[in-house]
Image (cartoon, rainbow, N blue to C red):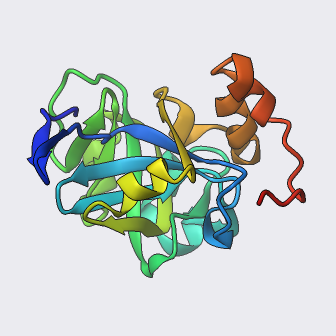
Amino acid sequence: MQEEGRAIGGRAMESMTGRLLVATPALKDPNFDRTVVLLVAHEAGGALGVVLNRATEVPVADVLGDWSDLARHPAVLFEGGPVQPDSAICLARMRHPMRRLKGFQQISGAVGTVDLSADPEKLRDGIGSIRVFAGYSGWGSGQLEQEIADGSWFVFDALPGDAFVDRPDDLWPMVLRRQGGMMAAVAHFPPDVALN
């Protein structure tokens, strides 16, 4: 859900909750090389997101058996980021985004987070698919804005299906290509070329 801008350090900040951070070729942190991050929360105190394109080989059924029927292909855990890798965040896509659903916290449109302590049977009719992330990506106050200003991230609008693509390894070039122009050209940037 988009929030109104708030003043930070004398200037207004517009929330980027629900938007995508796409790592630029200049980003040197191996935790985020060619990643696409969905911002789950962004406010004055910082930001939190999950990496959408780092699938593991651990089936959701091995960790959260009751939820595995709702997991979108590939039905595996994803590496959400380097912070608290033992914690889990579950993204879900509602079937009917205008309905209220207990245990579902909207991020943008039909996409939100789901409380994994809830009974999946009670959510089955309202949720089309889920994706489970081990850990998350976090930034302190002003840190993400500085990284964007330094050229580490592109910021784009998310499409409802971005968090649930069948081929997550293709998400980085796919998001860049759909921007058109020079951004589409970045999708073909060789992974082993160093930028100074």
Q: Position of residue 193 (x, y in %)?
A: 89, 56
Q: Is residue 131 visible?
A: no
In the rendered structure, the answer to whether residue 9 lies left or right of residue 16 reads left
Specify whether 52 is left or right of 64.
Answer: right
Say above or below: 19 vs 60: above
Question: Is residue 20 or residue 122 the one in the foreground?
Answer: 20
Vertically, is 115 above or below 39? below
Number of dots carrying numbers? 0
Q: Position of residue 195 (x, y in %)?
A: 79, 57
Query: Which residue is pictured at 63% across the width and 53% down the height?
Result: 35
Q: In this view of the protein, which residue sits in the foreground, 151 or 188?
A: 151
Is the C terminus in the top left, top right, bottom left or bottom right quadrant? bottom right
Residue extending farthest top: 181
Tell me the quadrant of the picture where the N terminus can be found. top left
Q: Can residue 45 be seen here?
A: yes
What residue sits 67% from the left and 50% below the top?
A: 74
User: Front-most of 12 and 39?
Assistant: 12
In which image quadrant can residue 142 be found?
Answer: bottom left
**x, y percent for residue 22:** 58, 44
Q: Is residue 73 above or below residue 147?
A: above
Q: Say whether residue 90 is left or right of residue 29.
A: left
Which residue is drawn at the image coordinates 25% and 47% (left, top)?
122
Please report the residue visible at 52 percent of the width from the left and 57 percent of the height from the top: 68
Q: Nearer the viewer, residue 14 or 133?
A: 14
In this rendering, position of residue 93 left or right of residue 161: left
